[in-house]
């Protein structure tokens, strides 16, 4: 996925403010990242959860979140996103 595709995905997740959508990235059938868009005090926050490390990071800047995600998924070209 290009950074433009990831940015579009982040925008889409935040578009549906009344619905809690979680997007999961997998590699070889293993979850490597869960992504959510949260609205806190009228601000959109991107929550990235790394299931294998039990770590949660948050970003308020869409460009920064997209860069982090793009860097992570570009490490393995076989990553796919399930529907």
Image: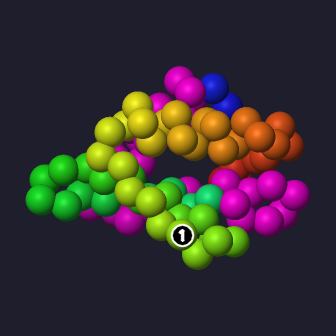
Mark 1: secondary structure = strand
- Which residue is at the front of the view, 58 or 10? 58
Question: Which quadrant of the structure image shows residue 30?
Answer: bottom right
Identity of the residue drawn at 57% across and 43% down: 69
- Which residue is at the front of the view, 12 or 57? 57
Q: Is residue 38 left or right of residue 82?
A: left
Q: Is residue 77 left or right of residue 73?
A: right
Neighbour class for label 1 at 10 Å: few (<14), some, many (≥20)? few
Q: Is residue 72 visible?
A: yes
Task: Write down the residue under mark 1.
Answer: 55
Identity of the residue drawn at 52% across and 34% down: 67
- Which residue is at the front of the view, 17 or 60? 60
Can you say whether 6 is above or below 78 in the image? Answer: above
**Residue that extends furthest to the left in the rendered view of this protein:** 41
Question: Which quadrant of the structure image shows residue 83?
Answer: bottom right
Question: Which quadrant of the structure image shows residue 17?
Answer: bottom left
Magenta segment range? 3-32
Identity of the residue drawn at 31% across and 53% down: 45
Is 81 a magenta residue?
Answer: no
């Amino acid at each position: 996925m290009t950074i433009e595709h990831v940015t579009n995905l982040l925008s889409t997740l935040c578009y549906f403010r009344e619905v809690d959508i979680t997007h999961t990235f997998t590699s070889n059938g293993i979850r490597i990242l869960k992504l959510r868009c949260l609205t806190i005090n009228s601000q959109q926050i991107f929550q990235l959860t790394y299931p294998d490390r039990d770590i949660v990071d948050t970003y308020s800047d869409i460009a920064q979140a997209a860069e982090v995600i793009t860097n992570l998924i570009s490490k393995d070209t076989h990553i796919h996103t399930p529907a």
